[in-house]
Image: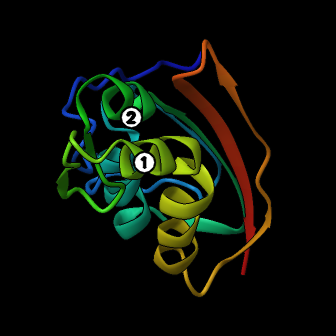
Amino acid sequence: MPSAVVRQADCDSWPFADLDLPPFTICDFDAYADPYASFRSFWQNADKASTVCLLFTDAQRGNIFLNGRFIHPDGSKVQIDTDIRNEKRRIYNFYFRKTVLPWFNAYIAPYRVKKTPFYHRNYNMLYWGAIVEL
């Protein structure tokens, strides 16, 4: 019976540099607060196959709605002037299409997005995935 090695580590950094791992074909970034911190670490360090399926759980829309603050996928913290309701509403309503996707498309280059299905649960939770190819 093969033995398993369990590694406990901070998911926002790459804890596998000492392992010889095969190229990744799928990866799930299920972190309500900021799934993109671990994604950025993964993307910079992991050996990836020519086609990769990526899955994300992102609750930033809730922060936008409640207090006008959110963590941008690039890691910067954004404060929306809460007196400007239309700006807050625009960012909330188009968060995936106008904030996440443009950043993601630029970040993964030279990979390109082939498909990006998404849905919202309870208005604020964003679940999305991407199939990317070299």
**From what the image shows, is residue 7 above or below residue 114?**
above
Query: In the image shown, does 38 or 83 lie closer to the viewer?
Result: 83
Q: Secondary structure at mark 2?
A: helix
Residue type, label 1: Asn
Residue 97's x, y, as percent?
63, 58
Residue 68: image location, x then y, percent: 26, 37
Which comes sooner in the sequence, label 2 or label 1?
2
Name the side, left or right, on which 115 lies relative to 77: right
Q: Nearer the viewer, residue 85 or 42?
A: 85
Instruction: Between label 2 and label 1, give the one nearer the viewer.
Output: 1
Label 1: which secondary element: helix
The residue indicated by pointer 1 is 86
Q: Is residue 51 left or right of residue 122?
A: right
Mark drawn on residue 60: 2
Residue 82 in the image: above or below residue 65 = below
**Amino acid, disc 2:** Gln
